[in-house]
Amino acid sequence: IDEPNAWYHNNWDPDFTCQHERKIGGSSLGDGPKWLCDPHRLAPSILYRQQHQATTTTETPESGCLIYSIGINTDGLNFEHEILDLLHKDDMNCEIHVFEPENEKFNNEMIKSSTLSIPEGSSITFHPWGIKGSTDVKDPYRFKSFQDTINLLKHNGRDIDILKVDCKMCEWNIYHDWFDVGKTGIGHIGQILVEVHGSPEHVVNDFFETLVNEQGYVIFHKEANTEFYGGNCQEYSFLKLRRDFFSSDYYNRGT
């Protein structure tokens, strides 16, 4: 476990196949691109959710497409722009919220004027703070917890369709907050696309056990970051499945 590249070679491999998974945001074996499960299904599933909520209750949170992107890397916003283009082809708009603390590298002026630019009128919104664990926020201007962010943006009760995380180690401190429904009031997170950094012994297995064993996610893609980190960082993609998918009754329903 002290050698992450070797540890990941032998632990936590994909256990599910998305037949039409697609790499979004570039083609490098490094920072930036993420693997998405069957992106052609995203718009129809969101439309179904909207129609279902409209017919089942008169008081529901907004049910449109929602994506959170925690961390900006050297590839800028390639992932965010490409996923928007895909959804626009299906006549589906989507709110994308990007989080990165302001510093010498990223600030509001760079977001407006550089290759990270967000066109006026775009549904991509940049927020100048990073995400830290709920017990680890000491500078509320530059960092907020996941729960505080949900509350501030008034996303309580909404589903997050895609959670993209590339925040250089913050994943180990915030993953429990993703599922603390009592505090966030979030519905559920459909896909989690995360680069994990290193393999900290005190937390790495709990991270995967929480997602896979407790929260009902499957791993559909795993890719070593060999461009910059020699495999010590890994790109993982998780897909949320219904609980009954894991039940024997699911497979016997037609007999």
Image: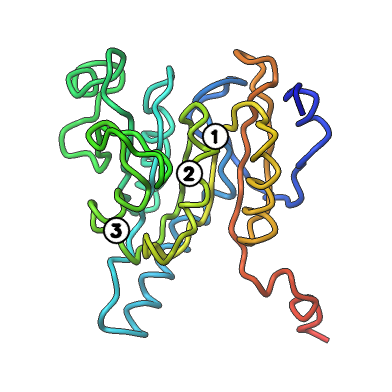
Residue at disc 2, secondary structure: helix
| Residue holding disc 1 | 34
Name the image quarter holding residue 56: bottom left
Identify which residue is drawn at 61% across, 48% down.
238
Q: Nearer the viewer, residue 123 or 147?
A: 147
- The numbered mark, 3 or 1, whose residue comes first in the sequence reads 1
- The numbered mark, 2 or 3, whose residue comes first in the sequence reads 3
| Residue holding disc 3 | 155
Mark 3–mark 1 Cα distance, whole angstroms, equals 24 Å
Identify which residue is drawn at 27% across, 39% down.
124
Camera-side mark, 2 or 3:
2
Disc 1 residue crowd, few under 14, some 14–19, many 20+, Cα 10 Å: many
Mark 1–mark 2 Cα distance, whole angstroms, equals 19 Å
Identify which residue is drawn at 61% across, 61% down.
215
Q: Amino acid at mark 2?
A: Ile
Residue at disc 1, secondary structure: strand
Residue 101, horizontal then vertical, whole percent: 30, 28
Residue at disc 3, secondary structure: loop
Residues at marks 2 and 3 touching, judged by CB atoms closer than 8 Å: no
Q: Quadrant of the N terminus?
A: top right
Q: Amino acid at mark 1?
A: Lys
Residues at marks 3 and 1 touching, judged by CB atoms closer than 8 Å: no
Total marks in image: 3
| Residue holding disc 2 | 174
